[in-house]
Image (cartoon, helix red, strand yellow):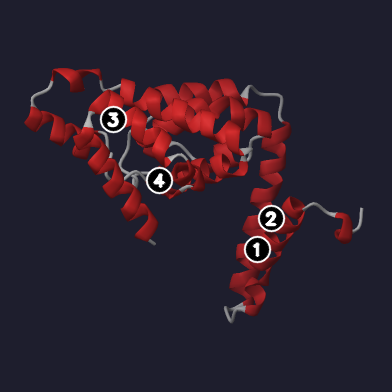
Amino acid sequence: MSRGDASPEMERLHDAWWAFEELRRCGLDPDRCDALLLRAYGYRDEAVAYRLAPIDRVGELRLQLKNAYFQNLQYEWFSELSRDDVLALLPQLVPASMHWDPNGNRLLVDFVNVALDALPREQAREIYLHAFTTYLQSFGYYARATPEERTRILRDYMWLGRQHLYRSATARENRLALERIIADRLGEEAVALYHVGLDAAREGP
C-alpha cells in the first residue's frame, strides 16, 4: 500500500514519529540526538514484544488498577494495548483516573482523554457517562454528610471542580447529560462546582 492509500490514522502515526526523528535537525549535539533516538527505537521494539507476548495483559492491568496507587500505574502499559484491550479496561480506568488529583499521573489521564475522543461518539458517551456515574456512586457517605462536609467532599475528594477529564472533547459533548446526573445524585451545589471545572478546563493550558 502506498502512502497515498494510507488511512488518516496511519498518516498521523507516521508524521508523529517522523517529527520525533527530526531531533537531528533541532540543533542538539548529534551524539546526544543519536543516543535519544536509539533509546526510542529500543522502546519501540519492546512495545512490539509486549503487544505480541502470550500474557494476560487485561487481567494483569485490572489487578494493577484494583491494587496499585493510580499515580504508580505506568502510561506505557496501557498505550501499547490493542483496541479490544483498551475497550475492556476503559470502564475501570476512567473512574480510577478521577479519584486522584489531576496532577498525580498526567500522562495516564491524557491517555484516557485521547482514548475516549478516538472512539465512535456514542460508544465514548456511554463509557464516559457510565464511568462518571460509577465514580459518583463510590462516595456513598456524601448523602449522610453535613452541608459543610459536602462542600469539602465535592472540592477536596471528588475533585469535581478540577477533573483533567473535562479537557476531553467527550466531556464537552456530554456536558448537559452529565449535569443532569450530577444534579440528580449530588444537588445544585455540585452542579455549580462542575461548571467551574469545565470552564477551567476550557481555559487552561
Residue 155, given in percent of the width and then of the height, sits at 20, 39
Residue receiving disc 4: 166
Which of pointers 2 and 3 indicates the residue nearer the eye?
3
| Tag of residue 37 | 1
| CA distance for labels 2 and 3 | 49 Å
Which of pointers 4 and 3 indicates the residue nearer the eye?
3
| Tag of residue 22 | none
Could you tell me if the residues under marks 2 and 1 are in contact, i.e. CB atoms within 8 Å? yes
Could you tell me if the residues under marks 1 and 3 are in contact, i.e. CB atoms within 8 Å? no
Can you tell which quarter of the image residue 59 is in? top right
Residue 39, given in percent of the width and then of the height, sits at 62, 57
Considering only order in the chain, which callout, 2 or 4, is on the residue closer to the N terminus? 2
10 left or right of 60 in image: right
| CA distance for labels 1 and 3 | 50 Å
Which of pointers 1 and 3 indicates the residue nearer the eye?
3
Residue 62, given in percent of the width and then of the height, sits at 50, 23
| CA distance for labels 2 and 1 | 6 Å
Amino acid type assigned to the residue bearing label 1 in the image: Leu
Q: Residue at x 48, y 21 (%)?
A: 63
Residue receiving disc 2: 41
Q: Could you classify mark 1 by the number of other residues whose Cα lies within 10 Å: few (under 14), some (14-19), or many (20 or more)?
A: some
Residue 19 position (above or below residue 104): below
Considering only order in the chain, which callout, 4 or 1, is on the residue closer to the N terminus? 1
| CA distance for labels 1 and 4 | 34 Å
| CA distance for labels 4 and 2 | 33 Å
In the rendered image, the residue lying farthest to the bottom is 27
Amino acid type assigned to the residue bearing label 2 in the image: Tyr
Amino acid type assigned to the residue bearing label 4 in the image: Tyr
Residue 147 position (above or below residue 195): above
| CA distance for labels 4 and 3 | 17 Å
Residue receiving disc 3: 183
